[in-house]
Image (cartoon, helix red, strand yellow):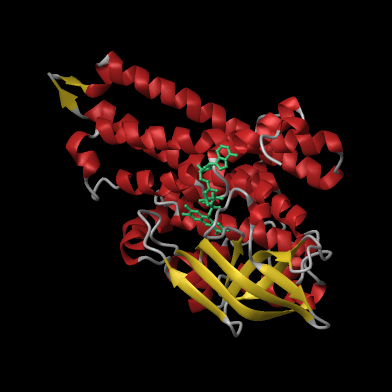
């Protein structure tokens, strides 16, 4: 067992921390206010290799391991507390990696290099107006033709609908085979004829859009199919495993940033003639939060480590361990981050409620992971219940 980071990992972590401190933090308020991540952020991200970083180098990525990507996600979550940049980061990392794994060679070469350079956007579209948790009940269909597929239906609450339209790019889209032959996972460029996008008004992570995608007989060529036809559900779950690990890591980073600000505040702010940190009520809150954040951070790193083992070696043992570890961190990291940000806001008193202190951005951003982004908390409980009790205990057909 080895808990120490390697020299390479520590150096990379330091470089991403510096990017967070010197590039993300100065832009954080503007990202939230203006509703976009500017090129001044995306270019250095691409320069550091942070965009779609697990993608192999022949397609423009850095071929980063899950562990290295997890470390970067922590730092990006710490740098932009609103989570907007973290979402951009983890979508490209998780789904870019999946495309590099299951996309056809021509598709990889066409889609991935500009994503890695920060010139185009890549996202995921599974959720529909009728629900996101029960994916098998989706209504969007893909009708097979001699040249590919014709998509009909609607997706909603999809991240990056505006970015994919503005920058170019598209979404990996899960659709039910119109003839009942499983699910297909297709790369759908946002500029495809028959595809229209909508933007929803969210409460947080304003720097990246969330919206709807409507498919009115959108033609998707066979070359845009990931893997084998009919097996799309399996590929989507593979991507979720990876993306959920990075979501959790970003929550850890946000929680650590909040606790750092809170610790400094408890040291320096006085009331009743003493620093706030001398009051046991607050000191113990800090300690309890520190312990929880530290625990979930190492859970996250272990989940990433298991992912690397699983991807390298496969096998049922790692599959089950990975599923448990990933569901456990996605279940615990967002609520812990939310609690850390909320508590620290309270230590700041009225100032915590202002945009100047900026903690409210974190509260709004982290909430997205409580309500459902990358899978609701109860869905993580269902995965864990299945792993602990057996598949016959899944509470639905
Ligand atoms: C900011 C944001 C960004 C998002 N980005 C994307 C994206 O890029 N692409 C995409 O496809 N989707 C995206 N989503 C959607 C997300 O995947 C869904 O919100 C999620 O899957 C839950 O689906 P739902 O919102 O339809 O809730 P529902 O499925 O309607 O569930 C509602 C509630 O019931 C709970 N629940 C459901 N089933 C059960 C059960 N059997 N037992 C107990 N509780 C249950 C859920 O956990 C949830 O709390 C995003 C969501 C948000 C908030």
Evaluate whether residue 5 shows in this view. Answer: no
Residue 88 in sight from this viewpoint: yes
Vertical relation: 8 (above or below) 206:
above
Identify the residue at horizontal 29%, vertical 14% (top origin).
Answer: 280
Q: Assign the C terminus to one quadrant of the image.
A: top right
Q: Position of residue 177 (x, y in %)?
A: 75, 66
Instruction: Report whether 148 appears left or right of 139.
Output: right
> Residue 21: x, y in percent?
41, 51
Residue shown at the point (64%, 80%) measured from the top left: 217
Q: Tell me the quarter of the picture where residue 62 sits.
A: bottom right
313 vs 86: above or below: above
- Where does the N terminus fall, quadrant-wise? top right
Nearest the eye: 358 or 332: 332
Image check: 75 left or right of 107? left
Residue at screen point 34% across, 49% down: 361
Left or right of residue 293, residue 245 in this image: right
Residue 151 position within the rendered picture, expressed as x and y whole percent measured from the top left: 67, 74
Residue 54, by quadrant, is bottom right
Q: Is 203 on the left-hand or right-hand side of 143?
A: left
Total tally of numbered discs in the picture: 0
Q: Nearer the viewer, residue 376 or 113?
A: 376
206 to 353, vertically: above or below? below
Q: Residue furthest left?
A: 272
Image location of residue 327, percent across then percent down: 63, 37
């Amino acid at each position: 067992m080895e808990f120490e980071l390697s020299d390479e990992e520590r150096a990379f972590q330091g470089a991403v921390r510096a990017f967070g401190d010197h590039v993300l933090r100065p832009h954080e308020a503007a990202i939230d206010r203006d509703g976009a991540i500017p090129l001044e952020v995306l270019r250095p991200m691409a320069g550091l290799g942070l965009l779609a970083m697990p993608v192999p180098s022949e397609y423009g990525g850095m071929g980063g391991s899950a562990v290295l990507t997890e470390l970067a996600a922590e730092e990006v979550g710490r740098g932009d507390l609103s989570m907007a940049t973290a979402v951009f980061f983890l979508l490209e990392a998780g789904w870019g990696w999946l495309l590099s794994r299951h996309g056809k060679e021509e598709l990889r070469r066409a889609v991935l290099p500009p994503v890695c350079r920060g010139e185009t956007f890549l996202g995921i579209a599974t959720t529909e107006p009728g629900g996101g948790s029960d994916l098998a009940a989706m209504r969007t269909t893909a009708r097979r033709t001699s040249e590919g597929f014709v998509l009909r239906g609607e997706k909603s609450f999809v991240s990056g609908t505006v970015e994919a339209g503005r920058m170019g790019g598209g979404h990996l889209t899960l659709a039910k085979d119109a003839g009942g032959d499983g699910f297909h996972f297709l790369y759908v460029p946002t500029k495809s004829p028959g595809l229209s996008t909508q933007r929803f008004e969210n409460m947080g992570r304003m720097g990246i859009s969330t919206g709807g995608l409507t498919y009115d007989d959108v033609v998707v060529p066979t070359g845009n199919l990931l893997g084998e036809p009919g097996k799309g559900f399996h590929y989507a779950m593979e991507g979720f495993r990876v993306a959920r690990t990075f979501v959790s890591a970003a929550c850890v980073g946000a929680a650590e940033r909040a606790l750092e600000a809170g610790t400094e505040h408890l040291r320096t702010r006085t009331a009743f003639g003493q620093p706030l940190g001398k009051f046991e009520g607050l000191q113990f809150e800090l300690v309890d939060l520190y312990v929880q954040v530290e625990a979930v951070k190492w859970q996250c790193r272990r989940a990433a480590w298991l992912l690397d083992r699983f991807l390298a070696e496969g096998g049922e043992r790692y599959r089950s361990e990975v599923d448990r570890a990933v569901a456990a961190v996605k279940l615990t990291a967002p609520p812990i981050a939310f609690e850390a940000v909320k508590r620290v806001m309270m230590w700041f008193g009225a100032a915590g409620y202002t945009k100047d202190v900026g903690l409210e951005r974190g509260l709004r951003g982290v909430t997205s992971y409580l309500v459902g982004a990358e899978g609701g908390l109860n869905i993580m409980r269902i995965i864990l219940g299945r792993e602990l009790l057996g598949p016959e205990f899944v509470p639905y057909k």
